């Protein structure tokens, strides 16, 4: 998977966070990512909380990308969001 774009945007439409599946309203600061995987483009939005969590992961954990809601499968993520 190759990441083409990763930037912070203010959403103009409600978007679901790819990591935690929560829906965020218009005007939320989210991280927008575009990646290409075997010729297929995929774009996703990430909330700041998930983005912080991603930055704590090693590259071996992120190189294959994530399915929708995948961060909820990380025990560390659940603990982090309970603080
Ligand atoms: Zn999230």
Image: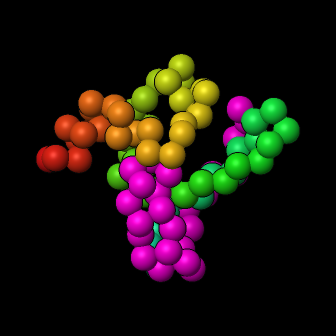
Left or right: 20 as drawn, with respect to 40: left
Determine whether 50 is above or below 28 in the image.
above
Q: Identify the image quadrant of the N terminus.
A: top right
- Residue 19 in the magenta stretch? The answer is yes
Q: Quadrant of residue 37?
A: top right
Determine whether 21 is above or below 62 in the image.
below
Q: Can you name the residue that lies furthest to the top here?
A: 60
Foreground of the two, 21 or 3: 21
Q: Residue at x 85, y 38 (%)?
A: 39
- Residue 28 in the magenta stretch? The answer is no
Inspect this view and state whether residue 53 appears.
yes
Residue 81 x %, y %: 23, 47
Q: Residue at x 16, y 47 (%)?
A: 82
Residue 64 x %, y %: 61, 27
Inspect this view and state whether residue 4 appears.
no
Span shown in magenta: 1-26
Residue 34 x %, y %: 69, 51
Determine whether 73 is above or below 83 in the image.
above
Q: Residue at x 59, y 34 (%)?
A: 65
Q: Residue at x 14, y 47 (%)?
A: 83
Colour mapping: rainbow
Residue 24 x %, y %: 41, 69
Foreground of the two, 55 or 61: 61
Q: Can you name the residue that lies furthest to the right here?
A: 39
Left or right: 71 as drawn, with respect to 2: left
Q: Can you name the residue that lies furthest to the left here?
A: 83
């Amino acid at each position: 998977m190759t990441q083409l774009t990763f930037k912070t945007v203010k959403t103009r439409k409600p978007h679901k966070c790819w990591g935690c599946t929560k829906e965020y309203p218009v005007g939320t600061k989210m991280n927008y990512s575009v990646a290409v995987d075997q010729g297929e483009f995929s774009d996703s939005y990430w909330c700041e909380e998930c983005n912080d969590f991603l930055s704590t992961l090693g590259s071996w954990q992120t190189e294959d990308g994530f399915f929708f809601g995948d961060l909820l499968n990380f025990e560390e993520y659940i603990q982090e969001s309970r603080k």
